[in-house]
Amino acid sequence: SAKQSGRNRYGFFTADLQARTARALQIENALRRALERQQFELHYQPQVSLGTGQVVGAEALLRWHHPELGVVAPAEFIPVAENSGQIVALGEWVLHTAARDAKRWLDMQLPLRAVSVNLSAVQFRHPQLPEMVTRCLQQAGLPARRLELELTEGAAVDDPVAALAMMDQLHDRGVRLSMDDFGTGYSSLSCLKRFQIYKLKIDQSFVRDLDDDANDRAIVSAIIRMAQALGMQTTAEGVETDGQLQFLRAQGCDEGQGYLFSRPLPADAFEAYLRAMK
Ligand code: C2E
Ligand code: MG
Ligand code: MG
Ligand code: MG
């Protein structure tokens, strides 16, 4: 009966929810200790100029290796860290580490223009964010223009006025801002034109099927042309094939990031990659 299946469905969801909640609690508890136990590491993925083929930047991507849970993906632990507030301390560690690594590579004259760091919407709403950014840059000795902060559209939807003020503050400190996963969120184009955004990162969901989906080709070329008209740079995410690369280059996309160029690499491997590019 409907009643029966309804109950079963309810029971199913409850069990599923409990399992997910248990896992989230386990992760939350383990996260509490993870920073002091030095279980985090940053990997770096090159960002390549499609015009020259040169490495122009690197995105820092957080990796967590827990002795029992194994490697936990950011997609799983970042939301937990956001809900528990731990993202603020974790985000500071990421920024501090990325700034220090970038400064070391620049001092070695390695070909790197900037390092990109992902910012959670929770960090973005934190009033002390601009001070935290400046503190990390000063501690590392890294000039602000060498740092790029990646925001998602979600960071700006709740309160566009506050978001605008925060972007202005970060921009005034000389940091570049990019809009990550562009096209998947809810930001309106009227907001976009007022934001101090330097670069749009075209979400990989539009890039994935470029080789055989005419709609994705239309969307990607429209994003690139809009960015150009607004004076913004573009980076395509998730570039995996030569066909995607050819299309993006022909459309005038500035940069690409993806497995075609390199997977995200541990710091020492990324350093070796930069040396080979020199
Ligand atoms: P994102 O910022 O959009 O990062 C790009 C993601 O795409 C990374 O996943 C990267 O490994 C993956 N990727 C790169 N090239 C390719 C490709 O060619 N094909 C495919 N299929 N994937 C590719 P990752 O490292 O698992 O990170 C997932 C998300 O977690 C990031 O998406 C970002 O939103 C978040 N994240 C990662 N590190 C941090 C961090 O330090 N702080 C915050 N707040 N979020 C982070
Ligand atoms: Mg990103
Ligand atoms: Mg992205
Ligand atoms: Mg993403």
Image: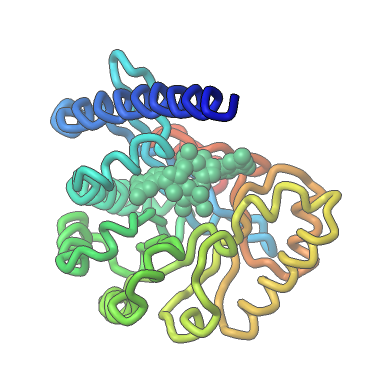
x, y percent for residue 26: 25, 24
The residue shown at (19%, 47%) is: 85
For residue 251, above or below residue 238: below
Q: Quick check: can you spot residue 275?
A: no
Quadrant in which residue 229 is drawn: bottom right
The residue shown at (23%, 32%) is: 28
Quadrant in which residue 227 is drawn: bottom right
Residue at the extreme top: 68
Q: Quick check: can you spot residue 218?
A: yes
Q: Quick one: quadrant of the N terminus?
A: top right
x, y percent for residue 209: 77, 48
For residue 167, above or below residue 266: below
Number of marks drawn: 0
Apparent side of residue 132 relative to residue 200 in the rendered image (left or right): left
The residue shown at (40%, 33%) is: 268
x, y percent for residue 79: 34, 43
Apparent side of residue 84 relative to residue 7 in the rendered image (left or right): left
Apparent side of residue 217 relative to residue 168 in the rendered image (left or right): right
